Amino acid sequence: MVHDHRLRTLRRIKKLYGVATEPDLQRAVEWADILILAVRPASVVEVLREIAAVRKSASRPLLAVSLAAGIPFTVLKRHMHSRVRWARAMPSPVSRSGRGLTALAFDRTFPTPARKELQGFFSVVGTTIVIPERQFDAFMVTYSASHGYHALAALAGAAEKLGLSRRTAQLAAAHALGDAILAWREGHLSLDALLGEAVTPGGIAFAVLSTMERAGYQKVIQGGLAAGVAQGRKNARLR
C-alpha cells in the first residue's frame, strides 16, 4: 500500500507497479503491518508529526522503517509515540536492477519475526546485511553508486583524452570496473590476491596505479568519505 499527498504521484505509481494506493494517511497507517517511511531527510519531522497525529488513539504498536539518510533512531523516536518500534534501511538506487545492497539496523525493541520479514522484503532487490546503527553513516558514504558512476566517468574521460572514442572509452572503463568487481564477488580469490595478479612490478598497470597513489588517490577518497559522514551528522543535528 502506497500513500502520498500528491494524487498524481499515486496514479503514476499505481500505473507503473500495480500497487494499491491510499490518499488518506490515517487509513494507510491503520492498514500497515510494517510502515516504510520513504521521504527525503528534510521531510521526516513533518511526516512523523502527521503520523503521530493520526495515531493518537492507536492501541497496537506500530512497526516502522525509515529510509531517510542520516536520521538516527533518537530523532525518529523524539517525534513519534513510544509504541513505535523502529528499524532503519538504506537500499541502493541500483536496486531497480536487482543487484542492490540494503543495510538494515534494528532498534532493540524491534521484534525478531519482523526483522526476518524485513530482510526478506529487501532481499527481493538484492543483498541485505544487518549492521549496528553506529556504522550507518560510514556504510552510507561507502556504498553509494555515485562512486561507481564517478569512477566510470573519470576513467572513460581520461581514456578519451588518450584518443579513444567515447563509446570505446566507456566500454573499456566499464570492463575495468564492473567486470573486475564481479570477478572478485563471484570468484574465490581475495582482493589482495587479485591486485597482486593484475599489478606486477615494472608492468603497465603498476605504472598507472603507483602514479595515482603518489598523486594522493587514497587520501582523496578518505577525505571525501569523511566529509560525507560529517555532512550526515550535521543534517541529523538539524532535526
Image (cartoon, grey):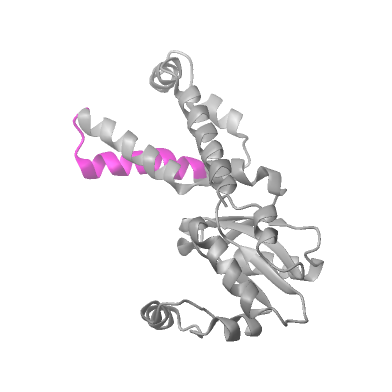
- Report whether 70 appears left or right of 212: right
**Residue 73 at least partly seen:** yes
**Residue drawn at point x = 19 percent, y = 39 percent:** 165
**Where is residue 9 drawn, in percent x and y?**
39, 77
Q: Is residue 55 above or below residue 180?
A: below
Magenta region, mostly helix, strand or loop? helix
- Residue nearest the viewer, comparing 29 with 198: 29
Image quadrant in which you'd find residue 112: bottom right
- Residue nearest the viewer, comparing 93 with 110: 110
- Report whether 58 appears left or right of 70: right
**Residue drawn at point x = 45 percent, y = 23 percent:** 217
Q: How many marks?
A: 0
**Where is residue 117 drawn, in percent x and y?**
71, 70
- Report whether 117 appears left or right of 54: right
Q: Is residue 185 above or below residue 123?
A: above
Which span of residues is magenta-colored? 162-181
Q: Is residue 9 above or below residue 211?
A: below
**Residue 186 at least partly seen:** no
Classify the position of the N terminus by image quarter.
bottom right
- Residue nearest the viewer, comparing 214 with 209: 214
Image quadrant in which you'd find residue 122: bottom right
**Where is residue 87 drawn, in percent x and y?**
69, 61
- Residue nearest the viewer, comparing 203 with 15: 15
- Report whether 59 appears left or right of 87: right
**Residue drawn at point x = 32 percent, y = 40 percent:** 153
Q: Is residue 32 magenta?
A: no
**Where is residue 160 drawn, in percent x and y?**
22, 34
Q: Is residue 163 magenta?
A: yes
